[in-house]
Image (tube, coloured by chain):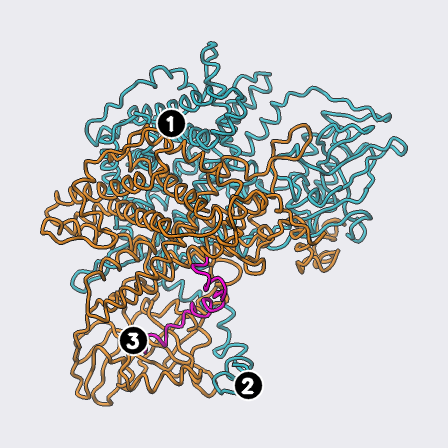
Chain colours: A orange, B cyan
Amino acid sequence: MAALDYHAEERSKAEFDVEEMKIVWAGSRHDYEINDRVARLVASDPGMFIPAIKGQGTEEQQEKWLPMAYKMQIIGCYAQTELGHGSNVQGLETTATFDPQTDEFVIHSPTLTSSKWWPGGLGKVSTHAVVYARLITDGKDHGVHGFIVQLRSLDDHSPLPGITVGDIGMKFGSGAYNSMDNGVLRFDHVRIPRNQMLMRDSQVTREGKYMHSDVPTQLVYGTMVNVRQKIVSNASGALSRAVCIATRYSAVRRQFGSQNGGPETQVIDYRTQQSRLFPLLASAYAFRFVGEWLTWLYADVTQRLQANDFSTLSEAHACTAGLKSITTSETLDGIEECRKLCGGHGYLSSSGLPELFAVYAPNCTYEGDNIVLLLQVARFLMKTFSQLGSGKKPVGTTAYMGRAEHLMQCCCEVERAEDWLKPSVILEAFEARAARMSVSCATNLSKFSNPEEGFAELSADLVEAAVAHCQLIVVSKFVEKLQQDIPGKGVKRQLEILCNVYALYLLHKHLGDFVTTGCITPKQGALANEQLRLLYSQVRPNAIALVDAFNYTDHYLGSDLGCYDGNVYQKLYEGAWKDPLNDTDVPDGYHEYIRPILKQHIRTARL
Amino acid sequence: MAALDYHAEERSKAEFDVEEMKIVWAGSRHDYEINDRVARLVASDPGMFIPAIKGQGTEEQQEKWLPMAYKMQIIGCYAQTELGHGSNVQGLETTATFDPQTDEFVIHSPTLTSSKWWPGGLGKVSTHAVVYARLITDGKDHGVHGFIVQLRSLDDHSPLPGITVGDIGMKFGSGAYNSMDNGVLRFDHVRIPRNQMLMRDSQVTREGKYMHSDVPTQLVYGTMVNVRQKIVSNASGALSRAVCIATRYSAVRRQFGSQNGGPETQVIDYRTQQSRLFPLLASAYAFRFVGEWLTWLYADVTQRLQANDFSTLSEAHACTAGLKSITTSETLDGIEECRKLCGGHGYLSSSGLPELFAVYAPNCTYEGDNIVLLLQVARFLMKTFSQLGSGKKPVGTTAYMGRAEHLMQCCCEVERAEDWLKPSVILEAFEARAARMSVSCATNLSKFSNPEEGFAELSADLVEAAVAHCQLIVVSKFVEKLQQDIPGKGVKRQLEILCNVYALYLLHKHLGDFVTTGCITPKQGALANEQLRLLYSQVRPNAIALVDAFNYTDHYLGSDLGCYDGNVYQKLYEGAWKDPLNDTDVPDGYHEYIRPILKQHIRTARL
């Protein structure tokens, strides 16, 4: 009984080699074999204390602090965000004032809103922090710099004088993120030696003179590219978990449609379920491949930076910013949609979906709020367009803008539904849409005498243009992936289907963009929708195998609904009895609360 | 300091009488004065045990059971949903087999999936349940009926023989819904007397003969109309809470845009924030008024039923089903959007938003899954259209279909952005869109030889047509509200602005629908968007006052970010120190876990 596979019939329907697909999903046979999940988990630890000292400390500082941190003689955290200040680092209020009398900095929180708020590991665990504060020498504000500050005694862990430190309280969800020690921290004139300012790029001398080395800000961009490409990879990881759960349960769950007392219809056979679920399945694969490409992009950028070649950096920066934004937003929405696709049982903690949602949610806010990032992309797009006339050739993901003249007047050639299966047709439609939306924004911007005012006024339209650009990137990287040699029976064919699902789903969702810009006609939009329905039928028999290819163990998935063998109801039922509430048949509180009511022993005066 | 109102300047900008708006929001001066919140809370208790006996029991059964339930000598729950069966009541598996030997029913759970699962109050508290089970007499299955079954001893609360009962475990969120005693229940041949079947509509005689009174199924529709109109009212309640929190915090929070070291820009002044927040503010008002209208509709339906007039019932049923679906879906998405609009702090439990989301989520699933409901609406629309030729006049919210011929060929007359402010222009555009999408579905359906197959195949399109119809209802009821006399300086003017925001936001969101059906041109779509931006500017100075008009106390809102006086950071900061983790400076576990690491007393072998 325990060995029965409720999905066996589903698995037998698959039209491709699932073992080969696992390798495609993993990225390579090597990745597949070493199963780098544990390595990735360790690598994603948020202790940015060490990287900050590595990146911004002098060699002397690195020699002093890093060994202690590595040996965990001290525990450090990264204290940047303040109660009143998030993404805008230049708005931080904490001050570090140099006192030439004693050769020290005085770290101080002048206002309530300057309290450090959110840093991970700060509240209860850390003994030291890299604190970001405004550097002030001789009454002059030099902007935000990093300082190493000891917070707690190494003898008894009590907070040092002038330090107020604690936990910020409960957060979304019932589990994982609440075990993160997010902290609050205030300084009351805390003194640190001058040599605890991170001085690789800027220095304060013994006399209090401020000196700034001219390090290209581009290097900061390089770090952001790295962090954000990791976030995109995590997006496909989180979305694929949710999709795996929802797909497997949709094949188990039956509702309505019973014929002559036979079993009800599998929920996954309903068109309404398919039209919500399969685009998410396709998105998981799409994000996987664009994440893979970003890993390459980061390696390329790093190599160029080492050769002092900054030519692709701003394009790479805009590209990762935009992809971070759209993949995390769509992943969060997708996890929630998967929860809804599981009906009432998706609401159970044992489905794994509520906690997956709560834990994933911060991705849309940290490392750049998603809307702020899209505005950065839009700014880059407007700049790129304005430079087209001057002959500057757009590179990388903006190369299509070099063909703007063609894209402004090209006509989509689709006449029959199957014409929408051609990658060239899809790419041109997405390129034309992105180009025309950008051009429309640029035209409207030019009507403002003050460009910044225009940018603010039109920002909602600019965000939409940036989304169109980023979606083009994801679609085009999926198409590029399919130009590679992909072995395994039927594997490439399945990926082609998913690529088309992803593109045509986006086209349907943003039909207004495509039609109002004249990239496609209403008739062609209807044909795309018709083709999409046919594609769903092709995904259907392979759906279970396509999520099996993610190769997640039941332990990793952590979901009764998503278990590999599909024995969902048994697991839910058995799981319920493990709840502590069920330790006794007669509940705690029966004698205190329930019995007096039933036996009318409560004072009626209180009724 | 404590009495300082951080929103005072915002409130002084309001261009209308907020006290009068509070009355409009409350529904009437009477409602405003009695503040019926507590009454509504009590009324929304999910104990459907008593209504079931009232609705389906004979007079004799009501006389026996209701007094005990009212006096709480027994505590009852409503056990319908099973582990494997949700919305489809006809799919339930629990059996109630009549045994003529003993004049009893044998209640039994033949499979794991027939376990009752979810009923509120079942797991630990209830002594009795109304259990829905398949009635079987003499080997014949008569479908699902209700039975009163005792679950626990009235002496010591222990489960009776043959009864297995418990709690189903943790659910989404960290608070409210987890305190709901959702239960699991199995029967092993439990015997109950024959007179515990609810026999108002169907009876089993002493000899085991089954008799069915021909009660019009329409009466069941009447109950559904009632439950669902309450859910729509609750939607405006939940959405307005989230909007109130996000709006107030958006006026407090500042980010970027600092000029010469001055304060940063209030987040609410950004167009990107306005274009996400203000449509939700408008939606809260729109749902409020459509909910108000539904209350009237239910009273009207009830009156007609009493006079045996069933002519409007199916239209009213479809209308409430559809409105339940779109208002709850948009409210849940809206709460989550409000959380994101609060940046990182929206993730804190003390923002109130995570729990509001988790507690609201089940609304999209219970009392009819939202997609299933939209398919019911679509079925009703197709039926209404098919009967147009036969001269049957569509009533109520479908009356516009009587003008289908006109709506199929009318042209939108908008030439300038301000033309979009005319209610007649907006209504015709929404009517034409809904009619054309329905006609398009009907045309495509007619191509299938098997209508049911066609309905299944095209269900995703049908859902979109149903959404278009339901959005038309909400828009038209908002417009109708504005035809009433609304006193108070500037009050009606604000509502006109919000009505236009709501309609034009929907038009922009579903631009593809409007343009591909030829209801409006791309140019007219761009003009609508232009007008929308102007409307946002008009909402801006009134935003705080418009959420003040909801008249929520800080206690009811339960959000540090949404507090009336706007002293957000003080409240967050003080709140953090109340967290039990902060009871001690040196955390629990320091000596056990942290100190050994810092002091290197851990066995290096384990590193």
**Furthest-top residue in this view:** B391
- Residue extent of the magenta highlight: A26-54
Tell me the quarter of the picture where residue B526 sits: top left
- From the image, state whether disc 1 or disc 2 is nearer to you: 2
Label 3, label 2: how far apart the Cα atoms are? 31 Å
Query: Image quarter for residue B524?
Result: top left
Q: Secondary structure at mark 3?
A: helix
Say which mark, if any, is on residue B343. Answer: none
Question: Residue flagged by tag 3: what amino acid is it?
Answer: Gly
Give the answer, above or below, for where B407 lies relative to B524.
Answer: above
* Figure quadrant of the N terminus of chain B: bottom left
Q: Identify the amino acid type marked 1.
A: Ser
The residues tagged by marks 3 and 1 sit, at their Cα atoms, a distance apart of: 60 Å
Q: SS at mark 1?
A: helix
The chain that hosts pointer 3 is: A
> Is there any visible trace of residue B581 in the rendered image?
yes
Mark 3 vs mark 1: give the one in front. Answer: 3
Q: Are marks 3 and 1 in contact (CB under 8 Å)?
A: no
Q: Is residue A171 left or right of residue B478?
A: right
Question: Which residue, as the protein is rendered here, is positioned at the far bottom?
Answer: A102
User: Residue B475 colored magenta?
Assistant: no
Residue assigned mark 2: B603
Residue ID for mark 3: A55
Q: Position of residue A169 (x, y in %)?
A: 46, 65
The residue positioned 64% from the left and 31% from the top of the image is A258
